[in-house]
Image (tube, rainbow, N blue to C red):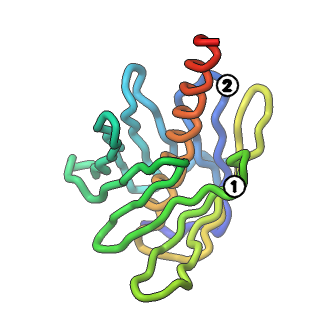
């Protein structure tokens, strides 16, 4: 992992399947959702990942590296919550607030209730694009993976919420 600044910007244009990660106007990474699948490919700096979503009622995500080796797993929970297992460590994805404009990736430390927030994400919604910032609060050799995972989870839960709204609207 290369050295990352404390703050990055992310942008997703309207109707686009691509989310770009930007540092000082330079695109340093992106996430791309496959057309007819929940799978996502992503890269940031020298890190390339593929998020493979599977399961029906209980969804799980395998995170693959560029060699297609599973390096992490994500358990998706009800209520827009998720748990990431990476290199023997556990991280929690937590939505802050009702409108999902802020969320956190928290390092779940064993034996303590003082779990540190390691990345904080915010969203600013505009009509033609969604954009926001992410702030890296704790440096780690896993930062690229953690940043991409947090953005993946945000996008996954927003898409899932939109699908539910569409089903409810069609039924009504």
Asked whether the residues under the numbered discs 1 and 2 touch, taking CB atoms below 8 Å apart as contact, a structural biologist would say: no
Q: In the rendered image, which quarter is residue 138 located in?
A: bottom right
The residue labelled by disc 2 is 14
Residue lying at 60% horizontally and 20% vertically, measured from the top left: 168
Lower position in the chain sequence, tag 1 or tag 2: 2
The label shown at residue 102 is: 1
Q: Secondary structure at mark 2?
A: loop
| Residue 87: x %, y % from top left | 29, 70
Relative height, residue 69 to residue 155 (above, below) = below
| Residue 153: x %, y % from top left | 50, 48
Which of labels 1 and 2 is toward the front? 1
The label shown at residue 41 is: none
Question: Residue 74 versus residue 12: which sits nearer the camera?
Answer: 74
Residue lying at 35% horizontally and 42% vertically, measured from the top left: 59
Q: Is residue 69 left or right of residue 154?
A: left
Residue lying at 42% horizontally and 60% vertically, measured from the top left: 83
Q: In the rendered image, which quarter is residue 121 located in?
A: bottom right
Q: Residue most toward the bottom? A: 111
Relative height, residue 79 to residue 155 (above, below) = below
CA separation in Å, label 1 and label 2 = 20 Å
Residue lying at 39% horizontally and 83% vertically, measured from the top left: 110
Q: Secondary structure at mark 1?
A: strand
Relative height, residue 169 to residue 10 (above, below) = above
Q: Is residue 105 left or right of residue 14?
A: left
Crowdedness of circle 1 by 10 Å Cα count: few (<14), some, many (20+)?
some
């Amino acid at each position: 992992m290369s050295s990352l600044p404390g703050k990055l910007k992310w942008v997703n244009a309207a109707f686009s399947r691509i989310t770009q990660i930007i540092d000082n106007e330079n695109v340093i990474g992106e996430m791309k959702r496959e057309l007819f699948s929940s799978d996502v490919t992503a890269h940031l700096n020298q890190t390339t990942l593929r998020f493979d979503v599977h399961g029906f009622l209980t969804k799980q995500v395998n995170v693959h590296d560029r060699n297609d080796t599973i390096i992490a797993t994500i358990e998706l929970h009800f209520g827009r919550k998720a748990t990431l297992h990476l290199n023997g460590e556990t991280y929690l994805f937590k939505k802050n607030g009702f409108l999902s404009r802020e969320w956190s990736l928290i390092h779940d430390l064993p034996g303590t209730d003082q779990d540190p927030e390691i990345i904080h994400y915010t969203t600013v919604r505009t009509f033609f694009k969604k954009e926001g910032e992410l702030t890296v609060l704790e440096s780690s050799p896993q930062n690229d993976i953690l940043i991409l995972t947090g953005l993946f989870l945000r996008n996954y839960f927003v898409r899932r919420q939109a699908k539910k709204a569409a089903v409810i609207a069609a039924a009504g």
